[in-house]
Image (cartoon, rainbow, N blue to C red):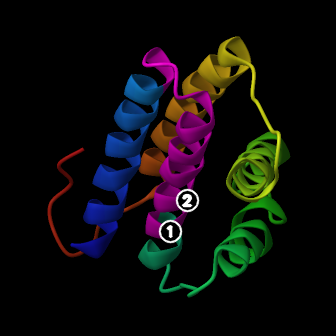
Amino acid sequence: MLVRYRLARATESIDEARLLLNSGHVNTAVNGIYYSAFYAVNGLLLSHGLSSAKHSGVRSLFHQTFVKNNTIDIAWGRLYDKLYDNRQKGDHADLIRFDKKEVGEWIVDVEKFVSLINQLIHFTDEPDER
């Protein structure tokens, strides 16, 4: 149930990021894009009995469990890292402005990422409804 919730939040965050971007709130859209990936990775980790209370822990577990063993291509690991770093910059650094076109491309990338994560999760507690 929690895995499905996380995946639903991932999709919701993509939609929110798109609305924010289209409204000119580019930096806030970057935050939403990251959270979409974060929720998806959280769902993937939970589906394998793993979790972390910290963002850095989620990132580390994702790389250790799925990227290093080639379950997920390293390019997706790099995308997650980029989104993580950009969210940090957007939330904590001064005078950061992201390019609207580039952020739009990140939304497309994170949609593909979330789709991939969905394909990797095997639900054992309920029939597959994906």
Residue 22 inside the magenta-drawn segment? yes
Instruction: Label 1: state its secondary structure.
Output: helix
Label disc, if present, on residue 120 of the rendered structure:
none
Please determine whether, in this image, residue 129 is positioned above or below residue 48. Answer: above
* Distance between mark 2 and mark 1 Cα atoms: 6 Å
Label disc, if present, on residue 38 of the rendered structure:
2
Seen from the viewer's position, the closer of residues 62 and 90 is: 90
Please determine whether, in this image, residue 21 is positioned above or below residue 76. Answer: above
Which region of the structure is painted magenta? 21-43
Residue visible at 28% across and 74% down in the picture: 2
Name the dominant secondary structure of the magenta segment.
helix
Residue visible at 63% across and 36% down in the picture: 27
Q: Position of residue 109 (x, y in %)?
A: 62, 28
Residue type pointed to by label 2 = Phe
Seen from the viewer's position, the closer of residues 68 and 30 is: 30
Label disc, if present, on residue 42 of the rendered structure:
1
